[in-house]
Image (cartoon, rainbow, N blue to C red):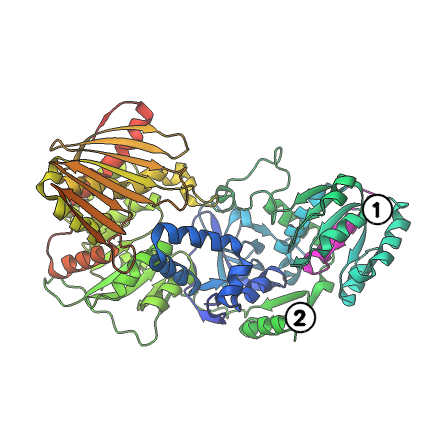
Amino acid sequence: MKQIAQNYKSGELTVLDVPAPVCRPGGVLVRSLYSLISTGTEMMKVTEASMSMVGMARARPDQVKKVIDQVQQQGLVTTYKKVMNKLDSYTPLGYSLCGVVTEVGKGAEEFKVGQLVACAGNDQALHAEYNWVPVNLCAKVPDGVAPEHAAFATVAAISMHGVRRAEVQLGETAAVIGLGLIGQLVIRLLVAAGVQAIGIDPVPDRCRLAEKAGAVAAGAPDDLDTVLAELAKITSGRGADHVFLSAGGNSNGPVEAAVKLARDRARIVDIGKMKLDLPWNAYYEKELDVRFSRSYGPGRYDTRYELEGIDYPAGYVRWTEKRNLESFLDLVARNELDVATLIDGVFPFDEAAKVYGDLKDGTLKAIGVLLEYPVPAEDAPPPATKTVLPGAKTPYVRTNEKGRQRIAVGFVGAGSYASSMLLPHLAKLPAADLAHVATTKSLSAVNAQKKFGFSTASTDADSVFEDESLDAIFIVTRHATHAKLVCRALATGKAVFVEKPLALTREEADQIAEAIATTGNDRLMVGFNRRFAPLLGSMRKGFGAAAATASTRYLVNAGPLAKDSWYLNEEAEGSRFTGEGGHFIDTLSWWADSPVEEVYAVRGPEKGDVQATFLFANGASGTIAYLTGGNARFPKETMDATGGGRSARLDNFRSASVWSGRGKSATKARGGQDKGQRSEMEAFVEAVRTGGPMPISADSLLATTRATIAVGESLLSGRPERV
């Protein structure tokens, strides 16, 4: 299928051939009829992508701060590679469309094949021929509503939520500053609610359009006195009960105008994205109530609502984002809201790149722009969920011979970690053929294919497991999926690499052990990369045999999680330590050359903090302090070892020192921080190619996994737990 995408580094905007998404549980597969270009939000993103690196930094100071913190923790080289990897990727555009349901996933039976639906979401309702949309971001279109009008539903929901945030009442008066698409819809919603509205915008045509939609008056900001005079007539001099800020840009003019328009104790609602430097005295004197309106409504940015389909009870949250979509469609169906006059152009989907270019350079001056998608013939095959790279070599049929020159590799998942820390190393190995990659998002698969040369890109994980040409399968997906996918991959007889954690529960660990025993396939590797780090290896060599009885301490300055991180969903994905702690336990176990026998853990002062003590089978001991409340620029990982008259310290994989007798040896990393991913990939590929032992035994992998799980058990029980 085709999809619009933009490279944020180069600014290139193009229509790509990508694999169509598969229909997953909890949602529906939708064939697009019309999608709406947001001339505000989307064009801002398109404009940012054409800026220089300095311009991008100025536009996103929040991201610059994150990068600076990463440089302090991870070093300049590592941070640069991660940032460039993220920038030099195709990103999707679009978030509002109307289409036809072509397939219904389990749990989405409220919809039917052939049904007309309006869809929302900047990861779901994209400018693409097909989209998978979860149930709470999808609304049935009532009979009589044209699909090109229903395509406005998401942007209308944004406007509607803004109006609801103001808590308007019948007979009140409101001013709308900024009469772009959002502002025009706000005017129409206010009029439908019985509120007298005036508008302000520097473009005369937009002012006249607002007046035709029912605004009492509309004028330019440089003629504010005229607008204020009209407002005084309809409010007996009181001023507006509500002022909506739906403009954009870096001017503080809208904020300053708002205080002049507002009555005493009025509500100011910010819907747009603009400079918001409030003149304190003016806002204080009128005791203005400033409110923000967050996107489509309650449910936005809540993964459980948007992706898992868990609705909020109407008795507690009357207007969710889905109910806002439905409310807009109902108003259009009852002819109480007109959007036809907002449509300035309908263009074929294939011309999308030109349309964006014309909007950007001002050739096309428009408020509402729709893209129309071709209707496939009745006998057309279903959309392909695989794409093959032009010129790709024909995959060979996998054999079990040892010592072959090259191996074929397949990936299930290719997110940020895989794309920045695994695939760049694999792509450079002469013995590895990157043959097949599957991700749930079409562009993620194509990004991996174009960057690293995968022959085949897919949105269906089944296609990787069924690919007979592969020698090894990498599983780099969310934590909750690992154990099930590992068991399935082992059953294929291929070598398996899975990122940590191997499992989230003892039951899952037992299932993997059973799969190994049943299939006879123990060709398993987990991404415990620290033991492969060159600095750590040289430090252990310098420490010598005393490591087997040493006492070790690992301090992890984990830091807080972003509010939208999927790690926060502990019910589904396990605790943060369960997901990451295996790295550090494996390192201590490797250092002591012994598995963990007993664990005792206590919580720290911050949520997510863990402090755990480990006793190893050979008598060695170690502690891990996994802390989330430290300074973002303090080194993330430090490790100390003591024993046999020797001491050693690893400082964030950037330097290592060993003290022995009266001497001290110190080593610094060359070329930036190296946590061992490159050496780990080399070791795994070589083991698969030659048929030699896996870099870490399956027994060790399972022992570390069970020790990680035992940490959580000890936190709950308050006592030591046997592994």
Q: Nearer the viewer, mark 2 or mark 1?
A: 1
Q: Quadrant of the N terminus?
A: bottom left
Q: Is residue 667 magenta?
A: no
Q: Is residue 184 magenta?
A: yes
Which residue in the protein does label 2 denote?
345
Query: In the picture, residue 637 is in which quadrant?
Result: top left
Does 107 sit left or right of 423 as displayed?
A: right
> How many circles with numbers are drawn on the protein?
2
- Residue 220 seen anywhere in this rendered image of the structure: no
Bin the neighbour count of mark 2 within 10 Å (Cα to Cα): few under 14, some 14-19, many 20 and up: some
Q: Which residues are magenta?
A: 169-193
Residue 164 in percent (x, y) is at 69, 43
Residue 56 in percent (x, y) is at 52, 62
Q: Earlier in the sequence, mark 2 or mark 1?
A: 1
Which residue in the protein does label 1 denote?
239
Query: Dot 2 lies on which element?
Result: strand
